[in-house]
Image (cartoon, helix red, strand yellow):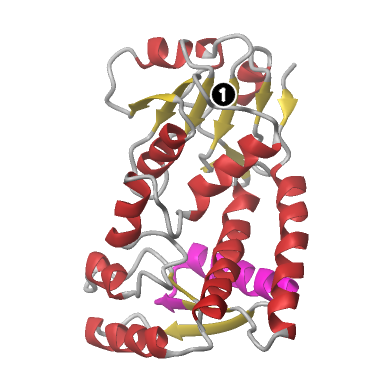
Amino acid sequence: MATIIDGKAIAAKLRTEIAADAAALSAQGIQPGLAVVLVGEDPASAVYVSMKEKACAAAGIFSDEHKLPPETSEAELLALIGKLNDDSRIHGILVQLPLPGHIDTDKVLEAISPLKDVDGFHPYNVGRLVVGKPLFQPCTPYGVMVMLKESGVSLAGKEVVVVGRSNIVGKPVAFMCLQEHATVTLCHSRSRDLAAHVGRADVVIAAVGKPEMIRGEWIKPGAVVIDVGVNRVGEKKLVGDVEFAAASERASAITPVPGGVGPMTITMLLYNTVQSAKRQKVQG
């Protein structure tokens, strides 16, 4: 049976280190600050924002929340982002997605200062990631890379197959793996003979958003499996993109759902915010 990669334990260790860094900065007069903007009343988004608020409080990070009504105009949202860009107390700005349909998401993300873009979604930061000189790295894929490192998995020379091509996870994690000298294949739901691609991978990173799409028998014996997917099946059950039980019998290590990649996402958001505050301190 595969070793379970415990995202909760790794996240807890990192959050202790992040809190220590935040406390050291605060002692020097700079408390790291994160602004979170929520437009509308999407239930899942509201839960995420609440989790981020609690995580900030535990880490000693100043949390500046802006909960806006669903009818908020694009111009009003852009004006708020402009104010947050100019606010020296704020080191990170996060606009919770999805936004209401009448607001241009790309325009909003591009309005955030690249120096406060702790989500790593601004084209400037995407470009820096692609050329191997990242400023901010997107939180979920960054969490995946930290989990691999903390689990003693070296990617150098390994065959990595990423299933999923989103701008939030699939594409950025592929570039991060390339930076670690892996040979990377980027697949998706329309890839032909997906089983063959997955079957030759030393490391599988599943981020396609389809319940148990990656079958356990596809996994190469001894491979490492990172399952980013979180899919609700029925009333309460959560499953990943990988058929966990069958894959566990073949993999050497695997992340569970829940309790795997999930806890790392907010952790890396906190990390990025503290790093941003450190940069401001250095720049004076």
For the image, the number of numbered tags is 1
Quadrant housing residue 57: bottom right
Write down the quadrant of residue 197 in the picture: top left
Q: Position of residue 241 (x, y in %)?
A: 50, 32
Q: Could one spot residue 257 in this view of the protein?
A: no
Report the side of 212 relative to 63 (left or right): left
| Residue 39 at x, y percent in the picture | 39, 77
Disc 1 marks which amino acid?
Glu
Query: Residue 33, percent across and down?
Result: 57, 80
Residue 281 is inside the magenta segment: no
Query: At 53% across and 17% down in the image, what residue appears?
Result: 202
**Left or right: where 122 falls relative to 145:** left
User: Dot 1 surroundings within 10 Å: few (below 14), some, or many (20 or more)?
Assistant: some
At x 46%, y 34%, the residue is 177
Our reading of the magenta stretch's main secondary structure is helix
Magenta span contains residue 53? yes
**From what the image shows, is residue 132 above or below residue 242?**
below
Q: Nearer the viewer, residue 12 or 212?
A: 12
Q: Residue at x 46, y 10 (%)?
A: 200
**Helix or strand or loop: what does disc 1 sit on?**
loop
Q: Quadrant of the N terminus?
A: top right
Span of residues in magenta: 37-59
Q: Is residue 121 visible to us here?
A: yes
- Residue behind mark 1: 243
Name the residue rendered at 65%, 41% in the picture: 260
Q: Position of residue 256 (x, y in %)?
A: 66, 35
